[in-house]
Amino acid sequence: MSLKALIFDVDGTLADTERDGHRVAFNTAFAAAGLNWRWSEELYGELLAVTGGKERIRYYLQRHHPEWLEKEGIEQTILSLHESKTAHYQTLVKGGAIPLRPGIKRLLQEARAQSMMLAIATTTTHSNVAHLLQATLGAHSLEWFAVIGAGDVVPAKKPAPDIYHYVMQQLGLSAQQCLAIEDSAQGLQAAQAAGIATLITFNEYTREDGFDGALAVLDHLGEPDQPCQQVSGACRCGEYVTVETLINGLA
Ligand code: XBP
Ligand code: MG
């Protein structure tokens, strides 16, 4: 069956948002609330085991301040902290702090030119996706995507496959007609559990993740003047990933 849609993860895939974006925004929200919690780059790497910002705060408390989970109103506290974090994150993104990764804009434009459908499957908050797309690809770039599946639209976040099932249902396509682009083991597990072939572009936080069964594992999508390095996978990607590469990789 032929390839009809590319489904992109956001954090770590479209852009390296975690270390200098989400992590910084969490720390700013904690400081603004008078909390001395501070997530170092290293600690944040451990906390990324759990997807979703609210879920990540709860996981941090379980591991580092379990007494907080006994406090009355803790769920509201987590919600308020997350709301504040989201606002700080969006200020960073609007200020241009987070560029797209190599090859992303080129591949999106090429896919559009070839009438390939585009979609997003992410655990982050929808408005974060909107801010990132608008800041990097322009005011109308949300319209490039037939479906943006984000955040709490499904109850179970990655590595559960729910967000991919949601996106496929909205697209009206089967798994065989889609290809996912992800950066992490949790993302790969989610897409694979939904039956979708997946290409991985890892980053500093995910380079040691397990990527068994991925179509290809690359350091990034590559550009004509910035070749990518392929680590594994049967899909031969050459110096940079094109729509043709992906169609051939699925054949
Ligand atoms: C990455 C995530 C998210 C973000 C924070 O999502 O795990 O939790 O770190 O987002 P993906 P929120 O790789 O699926 O794009 O704080 O908005 O939840
Ligand atoms: Mg990701």
Image: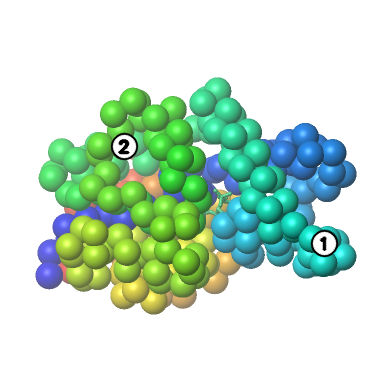
Q: Secondary structure at mark 1?
A: loop
Sequence-wise, which precedes: disc 1 or disc 2?
A: 1
Disc 2: CA contacts within 10 A as few (<14), some (14-19) or many (>=20): some
Which residue was labeled with disc 1? 71
Which residue was labeled with disc 2? 142
Q: Residue at x 87, y 65 (%)?
A: 67
Query: Amino acid type of disc 1?
Result: Lys
Q: Is residue 211 visible?
A: no
Q: Position of residue 214 (x, y in %)?
A: 40, 69
Q: Quarter of the image containing the C terminus? A: bottom left
Give the answer, above or below, for where 156 lies relative to 221. below
Q: Is residue 75 left or right of residue 69?
A: left
Q: Position of residue 132 (x, y in %)?
A: 45, 35
View extreme (front): residue: 72
Give the answer, above or below, for where 247 lies relative to 99. below
Label 1 near ligand 1 (CB < 8 Å) = no
**Residue 223, quarter of the rendered image:** top left
Q: Quarter of the image containing the N terminus? A: bottom left
Q: Secondary structure at mark 2?
A: helix
Q: How is the image coloured?
A: rainbow
